[in-house]
Image: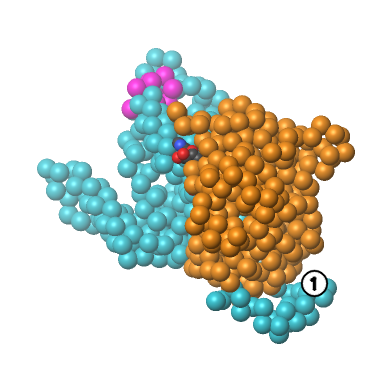
Amino acid sequence: MTMISKDPSAVAKVALEVDSLKKSFGGVAAVDGASFSVEKGTITGLIGPNGAGKSTMVNLISGALSPDSGHIRLDGQEIGGLEPHEIGARGLIRTFQISREYPDMTVMENLIVSASNQGEKLFNVCFRPSVGKKRDRELVERALHTLITFGLYPLRNEYARNLSGGQKRLLELSRAVMADPKVLLLDEPMAGVNPALIEKLGEHIVELNKDLGTTFVLVEHNLEIVEKICSKVIVVALGTTLAVGTMAELRKNKAVVEAYLGGDVRERVGS
Amino acid sequence: MDIILGYVTTILVFFFTYNIFTLGLNIQFGYTGILNFTVITFMAIGGYVAGVLAMPKAAAGSGIYYILGLNLPWPIAALGGVLAAGLLGYLIGQIALKRLRSDYLAIVTLATGTLLYGLIGNGTSIFDGWQGLFNVPQPFAGFRTWTPLGYSIFFTIMTGVLFVLLWLFANRIYKSPLGRVMRAVRDDQDVVEAFGKNTFKVRMTAMVIGSMYVGVGGVLTIAYITALSPAGWTTGETFVVWAALLVGGRGNNFGAIVGSFLVAVVFNEATRYLPQIPAHPNLIPDIRYVLIGLAVILSVYFRPQGMFPEKKNTFLEVPLGDSSKAIEEHLAGGLSKVGEQ
Ligand SMILES: Nc1ncnc2c1ncn2[C@@H]1O[C@H](COP(=O)(O)OP(=O)(O)OP(=O)(O)O)[C@@H](O)[C@H]1O
Ligand SMILES: [Mg+2]
């Protein structure tokens, strides 16, 4: 496994760095000394068996939980223990393992409300309502474009609660795009999605990565799509980093095969 | 004629003040999802503080005790009452909104309300305990020589104007980016937080504004009745405001108005004409509570979103720049089908 490089030019290329991160729940060490780094502009996979601690890591990185010990750095700055909104405001946006749309708002509103700097201040409500109106015009424009890209345009005025499971996944990703994230941390964005849409979501991620330079961290159990779009894959097991490499390399790694890529999985991946 | 007019003005004042309470709760619960289970406490604090600011010093030896007694002109006293309600909202928010999820918040608000009720009731030196304040000066009473009816009409108009202004402001919040973020917080606080927005601040804003609304209602109540005692703000009254909002339609200010009309006017007035049974003086008010409870049950069962559910918000899609062309091109390409599969 690669250790974190101390070379300054390499540091500048690192978007997200996790260093000896630990988090226990009572007696359960959910994350137990995990260390890895994610280079800027890459799509990095984060895989591991159920209960390996992936979602807990996502929660620690995004501030939903605060670490017992260890460091998390975004663009070289410590973010461990910050409030979720502080981390979100620094450009790290996460999605949830189970889709969490705003059910009683329309698809369009789901997108617009997710943009940063909407002018959502009481001062503006009282004295400068035009600020919000002007910004809304820009946001509507952007949201329409995003919805078209994601194929949600016809559903724009539908309540988000009425979308299908797959459509909610598309909504989550398009909503995240509206926030202009530097790093997008996706917790199983393809869970419960049909193969055609998995393909589609994969394409969207690759496109966003290319066009906007967004760094992606993709927690996923579907190894086919991980292999297809991730340049680097981190394997976690029992709360620690087990190995890092391309999928091809990992498949040759005995420890990884034993911990996660058991026979049946290997068959599914087709190696 | 005068009797009818007097009756109508009283009902209207009652209706307008109830609307103001309901609007305040709508901002807290309907917009932002804050479960405030002590709405009526904010009305009491607003009313009491405005009262003691407007009243003269409590006369020594009169057996009546209250704090302050600053003899301030009504507009200043009213403002003080509203600010006091807002401050109470802020303090409860500091305890309840920081870490607690909405259900715990409900418990904290309920507990705070009960605590203040006991404190004010038993702490005779604050607002004269269970006896309460009376002879509270009426706004602009010395402005000219009023006939009783003339004053009632004046007060009704003043209350109506305040209600309309507060209604417009509540709608303005709803339609603003702030209102949108509030509704997102209501739908899923964690997601809003993950998107880099300080949800504590958003919820606190709604809490304080809502409390101030209810405070305005309290200031008007004490000014109209010229008295206020704990018997007038028991916990049950909070749920009358809740009933108005739930039956009318949370998230919809028009629904809030209809609900207030039903609960505050129809039920209140209809039960007034039931024959009094001397042995059971509380029967009529109790029947009113039963009816209100029934309305809530029926509404939750048959129309869970209320009579006037929250409206769907759409956006003006007049394209800027080249987007209309782009949209047409994309749609011609059949991309729109993807989301519909
Ligand atoms: N809030 C919590 N309280 C107690 N234990 C927890 C909590 N959250 C997670 N755990 C435990 O920590 C371990 C790691 O859980 P986590 O959800 O991070 O796994 P995961 O890798 O995301 O699994 P999956 O692939 O199934 O989503 C599990 O043993 C889980 O039971
Ligand atoms: Mg998980």
Tell me the residue that label 1 is attached to.
B320
Q: Secondary structure at mark 1?
A: loop
Q: Looking at this rendering, what residue extends furthest in the right direction? A: A9
**Predominant secondary structure in magenta?**
helix
Residues in magenta, as a range: B120-130
**Magenta stretch containing residue B128, yes or no?**
yes
Decide if residue A100 is in sight here: no
Coordinates of residue A243 in the picture (x, y in percent)? 64, 42
Rate crowding at label 1 as few (under 14), some (14 to 19) or many (20 or more) other CA atoms within 10 Å: few
Coordinates of residue B24 in the picture (x, y in percent)? 51, 48
Quadrant assignment for the N terminus of chain B: bottom left
Q: Looking at this rendering, what residue extends furthest in the left direction? A: B279
Name the residue rendered at 35%, 56% in the picture.
B263
Name the residue rendered at 58%, 42% in the picture.
A255
Report the amino acid beneath label 1: Leu
Q: Is residue A68 found left or right of B149 in the rendered image?
A: right
Coordinates of residue A227 in the picture (x, y in percent)? 66, 58
Name the residue rendered at 59%, 44% in the picture.
A254
Quadrant assignment for the C terminus of chain B: bottom right
Nearest the camera: A174 or A250? Answer: A250
Q: Which chain is cyan?
A: B
Q: Colour of chain A?
A: orange
Coordinates of residue A37 in the picture (x, y in percent)? 72, 40
Q: Is residue A14 found left or right of A52 in the rendered image?
A: right
Which color scheme does this rendered protein use? by chain
